[in-house]
Image: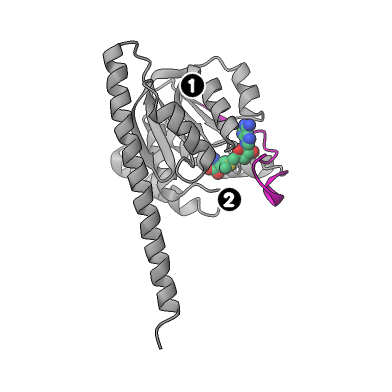
Amino acid sequence: MNYISQNNHLKKLLISTPSIPGWLSPKEGSFLYKKARKVPGNGVVVEIGSYCGKSTIFLGSGLRRNKLARFYAIDPHIGSPEKEGEYRNINTFPQFQDNIRKFGLEEKVIAIKKTSEEASENFLEKIDLLFIDGSHLEEDVKKDLKNWLPKVKKGGIVSVHDVTSLPGPWQIAKKNIFFSPSFKKIGLVGSILFATFDQSKSLTIKLKNRFLNFFSYLFVICYVRMRKMKKTISNFQTISKQFPRL
Ligand SMILES: C[S@@+](CC[C@H](N)C(=O)[O-])C[C@H]1O[C@@H](n2cnc3c(N)ncnc32)[C@H](O)[C@@H]1O
């Protein structure tokens, strides 16, 4: 697929996915699609937390042409412990399956109807791209990273959703990604934090990673503060317009 048809494919996806329930923004969806497209032949992608399939569709569509790649979408589909009311006990599997079918991805997506912890116990493949968006409780995000990181290939990508919007993912990303020498090339798209897993044993490389990751941390903090300030100003402007001076 050339660049133009790839772009058209993504544009079509962005038009047809907004109706799918979920919290993933179009910018984040595009990011997942593009990262999945870069997964090598015979590569492995793991998604933790599929809900109704929005992120699954972006990742799966990015992998569609990669015939040998395997994509595992892990979710028990019984609701989230952190949620209140309607999201706490729901069966999202029928809607998930329906959406995967609508986008013609039933051959590409291997759904694992288990918790991330249960699924990790028997998972022996090495991962090229890991996307964590399951339970957002701090101890659960910690477990996800602890159980799945040893299965990521050297040079593989680890990405975590809601890092800048929820305290659980933020605390774990701070301790285990920003302040870790085992990651490099940290970036942020929407609220997805992503980084390259680097298992180098060299002390120089570890020091370099620590140093650069600390700057990424400072950059992300400044960026998020600015984003919040911009939002407050625009909210204030909207209120001023609603209540003009007499
Ligand atoms: C925020 S939603 C995922 C949204 C999805 N990635 C999307 O883009 O629409 C969180 C999902 O994580 C699932 N979940 C909760 N605890 C989990 C666990 N321990 N392991 C795997 N998935 C879990 C929930 O069932 C829920 O569907």
Nearer the camera: disc 1 or disc 2: 1
Marker disc for residue 100: none
From the image, tell me which residue sits under label 2: 21
Residue 188 shows in the view: yes
Q: Secondary structure at mark 2?
A: loop
Asked whether 143 or 97 is in front, the reply is: 143
What's the CA distance linking mark 1 and mark 2? 28 Å
Sequence-wise, the earlier of marks 1 and 2 is 2
Quarter of the rendering containing residue 205: top left
Please, which colouring scheme is shown?
one colour
| Label 1 secondary element | helix
Q: Amino acid at mark 1?
A: Leu
Q: Is residue 21 above or below residue 118?
A: below
Residue 36 at what x, y percent from top left? 42, 33
| Number of residues whose C-alpha sits closer than 10 Å to that of mark 2, classed few (under 14), some (14–19) or many (20 or more) | few
On residue 149, the disc is 1
Quadrant, the C terminus: bottom left
Q: Residues within 10 Å of mark 1 (few under 14, many from 20)?
A: some
Q: Amino acid at mark 2?
A: Pro
| Residue 156: percent from left, percent from top | 40, 23
* Main SS, magenta residues: loop
In the depicted view, which residue is nearer to us: 193 or 215? 215
Residue stretch rendered in magenta on the structure = 71-89
Q: Residue 34, percent across and down?
A: 37, 37
Label 2 residue near ligand 1, CB within 8 Å? yes
Say whether residue 53 is visible.
Answer: no
Residue at image location 67% in from the left, 42% down from the top: 92
Q: Position of residue 208 (x, y in %)?
A: 27, 22
Q: Quadrant of ligand 1?
A: top right
Instruction: Point out the image quarter for the N terminus.
Output: top left
Residue at image position (51%, 53%) is 18
